[in-house]
Image (spheres, coloured by chain):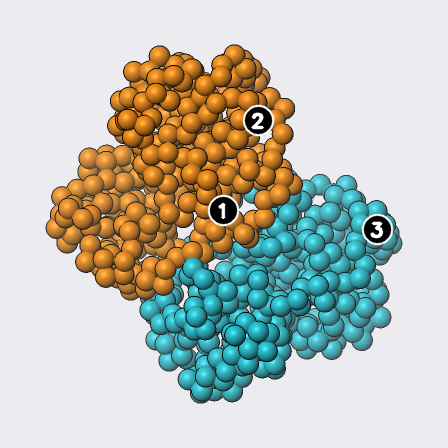
Chain colours: A cyan, B orange
Amino acid sequence: MGKQDSTQPDFPLTKIFMANVWSNVADIIKQHQRFVLITHERPDGDGVGCELALAVFLKQLGKEVAIINNDPLPEMLEFLDEQGCVRVYHPDRDQSALTNAEVIFVLDTAENWSRLGKLGEVAQQISATTICLDHHPEDASFTDMAVIDPQAGATAELIFELIEYMNGDLTLDMALPLYVALVTDTGSFRFGKTSARTHRIAARLLEAGVIPHQIYSQIYEQRPLGHLHLQSQLLAQLTLAFGGRLAWSKVSQETLQRYGVNRRDITYLVDLGLSVAGVEVSVLFSETNNGSVRLNFRSKGRLAVNDIAQRLGGGGHPFAAGAQIEGPLEQAIQQVLKQVQQTWSQDGLLS
Amino acid sequence: MGKQDSTQPDFPLTKIFMANVWSNVADIIKQHQRFVLITHERPDGDGVGCELALAVFLKQLGKEVAIINNDPLPEMLEFLDEQGCVRVYHPDRDQSALTNAEVIFVLDTAENWSRLGKLGEVAQQISATTICLDHHPEDASFTDMAVIDPQAGATAELIFELIEYMNGDLTLDMALPLYVALVTDTGSFRFGKTSARTHRIAARLLEAGVIPHQIYSQIYEQRPLGHLHLQSQLLAQLTLAFGGRLAWSKVSQETLQRYGVNRRDITYLVDLGLSVAGVEVSVLFSETNNGSVRLNFRSKGRLAVNDIAQRLGGGGHPFAAGAQIEGPLEQAIQQVLKQVQQTWSQDGLLS
């Protein structure tokens, strides 16, 4: 609780300041030829959507562009990159692209180089100009330049505005990844930072040819049947605690293997717990393939969860956080419930 | 299949025509004092949202307004009407409001008076001017005037445009029900008719003070735990047929009662089947309290389902339809699967 304010940066970005920023970024784009775009480990729709849209735009301007990430795309986003533009970093193949880069865009990733995994270690040693574009309310002093707008629903809003500032031609192959970024990062226009600006940008993307129900189907309607049967198990085990304010469920490695489902593909199921009346926080416990337990916390928006995640050695945002702790599963669940009890007791929530 | 086009009216509504319509509607509003607003049986978010927003607007203009429906609000929308403005039709109490009405707005309801249940029988005998506003692609010649725009994502888009045409002051108590209407009728901005206009209207509603995640939570995050356990059962029983193109699940009256869940509150769960890769159509079979079986059909948008529903004595739209047939449950399932097989065979889909 109260974590929200402490994570707001002390430089509110007015429109005028934003315009100045874009003129600086635009100057750098105009003055250089070779670009590399990267995003955080385990890339999501916003990171990848921004990379793909910005790459198309830079190519429109006649630039050389490589997209290099630390990890592969999640399966649900593979449809965005049928041409295989997004590379997974491989030292031999990608070192020259990185070394020759004049500008590296670090997208949807503030905080520090370590958010980029091994690729971050390499990228920070390149002499290129580095530019961070992000909407996470983090410090971004690790790059040469940064445009951070914590009011944006997704980093894609910044990419849209940069393209617009530079009078880019918004083609469908830009609009599509930007739309995917908006939809996935705002939970279909419902999360806290969805704004009038988010909707106005969505309107422009639809005018560029995006067909919402087709994209929705591509992202969310391609699950194997086993995935839904596993979801059934999670729901059957959904349990309330602390007077109904916390909902938790669990999935073992054995269950994941039985249904042939990747642990990372079910993270979003933590949201199911939030649909119960009275629940403020939902936790999903999932066993990894080395026997440790991954925790995913989600909050409806009144109680912060990143403080609890931090005490368990993890981190995240006030209303979406995570951690990884030692197993076995049942012991991990007890440990976490105890930590929640301690934290909420200290905050006077269980009196 | 192909049903889409045949349901399009042969009067494409250009902007100019729309503007003329609004001037006619505005004239009628200005010239009268006593209004009654009604919507279809088993009202949904769009019907009720339109009623509430239009009522606030008419009261802003100093008019007398009553909202009278055939059925009560669904539980998930009760938060919209804390002051109890929406009445369920009761002959003794409501006859005078209807008899004295100068104008009756029939909202989100084209086709005919029978879509309004018993209330329709009464309303069609009143001498008031009747005006239908709807986005369903149906004939609306049963009212004196009609504004039908099948391109709108929700009837709420028409109400917004009427208010804007008449220079209404868009207050939060109008914006909120209009936003609920948009979100529920477009499936959070994902269904086929979501357009740039839908998003631009949403932007205006957010500027009027709507907070998306609060509304989402009010509508979708107030379920009893039993509801999620019932959902677990539906998912466990989810079955594929016809080479994976159809997914179906079932719920018995006994299961509904065990979990304390109202049959009508689970209709939306038919969407779960659509999340499976390869599935084109999903069917939910739910046993009613008199032993008959309600069928809900949903389609991803390539195969029509209203033709099958019609052959089973029901109806609906190409991609969302329903019917009610005799039980028992297992027999009903076999009957429907046979009907699907016949229809798809005739259409050459199972060759």
x then y, percent, for residue B83: 46, 40
Q: Is residue A205 left or right of residue A57?
A: left
Q: Quadrant of the N terminus of chain B?
A: top left
| Residue closer to the observer: A101 or B204 | B204
Locate residue B231, reporting x and y percent.
Answer: 33, 60
Disc with the residue nearer the chain's start (1 vs 2)? 2
Taking depth in this image into account, of A318 and A210 the one nearest to the observer is A318
Question: Residue drawn at (68%, 72%), measured in percent from left and top?
Answer: A116
Nearer to us of marks 1 and 2 is 2
Badge 3: residue crowd in 10 Å (few <14, some 14–19, many ≥20): few
Q: Is residue A343 left or right of residue B248?
A: right
Chain letter of mark 3 equals A
Element on which disc 2 rests: helix
Which residue is label 3 attached to? A17
**Tag 2: amino acid:** Gln
In percent of width and height, residue A232 lies at 34, 66
Does residue B9 appear in the picture of this structure? no
Q: Please tell me the numbered disc located at residue B188.
A: 1
Marks counted in the figure total 3
Q: Amino acid at mark 1?
A: Ser
Give the residue at x 15% y 46%: B290
Residue found at x 62% / y 43%: B209
Decide which of A78, A315 is in the foreground and name it: A315
Callout 3: SS: helix
Residue at (53, 26) in percent of width and height: B59
Comparing B122 with A322, the one in front is B122
Q: Chain of mark 2?
A: B
Q: Which residue is mark 2?
A: B60
- Whole-percent x, y for residue A311 in the image: 61, 81
